[in-house]
Image (cartoon, rainbow, N blue to C red):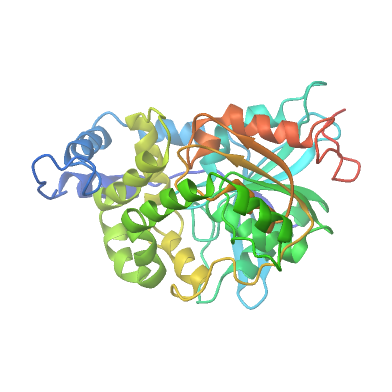
Amino acid sequence: MAGATEQPFTLSVSDADLELLREKLELARLPDELEGAGWDYGAPLADIQRLLSHWKGAYDWRKSEAEINKLPMFTRDIDVEGFGTLNIHYVHQKSDAANAIPLLFVHGWPGHFLEVRKMLPLLTAKSPEHPSFHVVALSLPGFGFSEAPRKPGFAGRQYAEVFNKLMLALGYEEYVYQGGDWGHLLGAHVVTHYGHKHVKAWHTNMLRCHPPTLLSHPRAYISALLDTTVKAKLAYGAKWRRSGMGYMIEQSTKPQTLGYSLADSPVGLLGWIYEKLVGWSGDYPWTDDEVIEWISIYWFSRAGPAAASRIYYEMTSGNTQDPMAGTTWMSVPVGVSYFPREPVHLPKSWAPTLGKVVFESEHDKGGHFAAYEVPEKLAGDLRKMYGKGGPAHGVVSGKNGYD
């Protein structure tokens, strides 16, 4: 089953596509900027000018491409009920540990599969001191180098089906899961549909859940009443909703309109995503090469730069429902890592509404892209959660992470 349709994947952007990009960069027309605007109005003009110059000159896509191709990448056809077959791209990095734990890593927006790259050597390392993992990191349908759905309605249930079928095709009947951003929200869906039988535990670095009620979660409700951080956490979240969620409303309601700009203008795409990379990360020192490589994954993506935005529309039914609609509380063990610059800030006392919380860890640095910003911290949490003496040790039958 594991080798039925799997094909090795090598990233190879055509010379014609690179030439078209160069032409578009040369013809870029930038907007003006108000004096002293800084970040208040969005990505600063000086930053975009610098990045544009770097993209046109010093940045070497072929060098990035060669480094990306060092990853063990593959594609595989996955049949999705009602949506036909989608060709899915993924990284599959195996450990040398005999009993390594299968782990599915799922990114979000504006992320992509390369978020996992820095964690791969940490998670797959074999040691008697910590567990090891076989890591699968896919490109979500419509992102990176996965095929995009061709008709409306591809939402939580369908993503969960893709995830589970991919892991089963790789021979992993039981596995654990890690995700942030959409990876978190989709995690709730995959656990709802495949928890216990296939998904044995999961971990998130972005707590997004509902407030506890006296009837649904009485202990959590009482804990929340006593939680002195609730007011500050909710105020932080309210501020972000007022001033930082315009992108979400647009992508949840009219992604096609936005898509014309993203698909045609590499500089427009740069501005749209760069603002989030900086605004949602901690004190991470983004290099110009890192930023341009990140944007390039979107620009050269299989379905085009506009396709990824549609996940917002589909998961919210055009901004008319909660993206967690259709999920249910499951007693599958869940761990939560808290990073200070994560924009989605909810009280820790709400976490039990997500599932059976068995592990929590609070960090002093890091933000939304924790796997990329502070890989050692996120990998460390997974080691603690699944290692010997950890609350989720041995959840996968016969795969405890050690030789």
Using the image as rendered, state which of residue 318 and residue 72 is in the foreground: 318
- Quadrant in the picture for the C terminus: top right
Q: Residue furthest front?
A: 226
Could you tell me which residue is drawn at 75 percent across and 47 percent down?
A: 176
Give the quarter of the figure containing the N terminus: bottom right
- Given residues 229 and 163, the one toward you in this image is 229
Picture quadrant where residue 61 is located: top left
Look at the image and tell me whether residue 300 can be seen.
no
- What is the x, y in percent for residue 138? 60, 50
Q: Residue visible at 56% across and 49% down?
A: 347
- In this rendering, the count of numbered labels is 0
**Is any part of residue 287 visible from this angle?**
yes
Q: Relative to 388, is 209 on the left or the right?
A: left
- 332 above or below 122? below
Q: Residue at x 26, y 61 (%)?
A: 261
Q: Is residue 262 above or below residue 138?
A: below
Q: Quadrant of residue 132?
A: top right
Name the foreground residue: 337 vs 16.
Answer: 337
User: Residue 140: percent from the left, percent from the top?
Assistant: 55, 56
Residue 249 horizontal side relative to residue 142, left or right = left
Q: Report the front residue among 321 and 297.
A: 321
Q: Position of residue 39 (x, y in %)?
A: 24, 42
Residue 399 position within the rendered picture, expressed as x and y whole percent measured from the top left: 86, 39
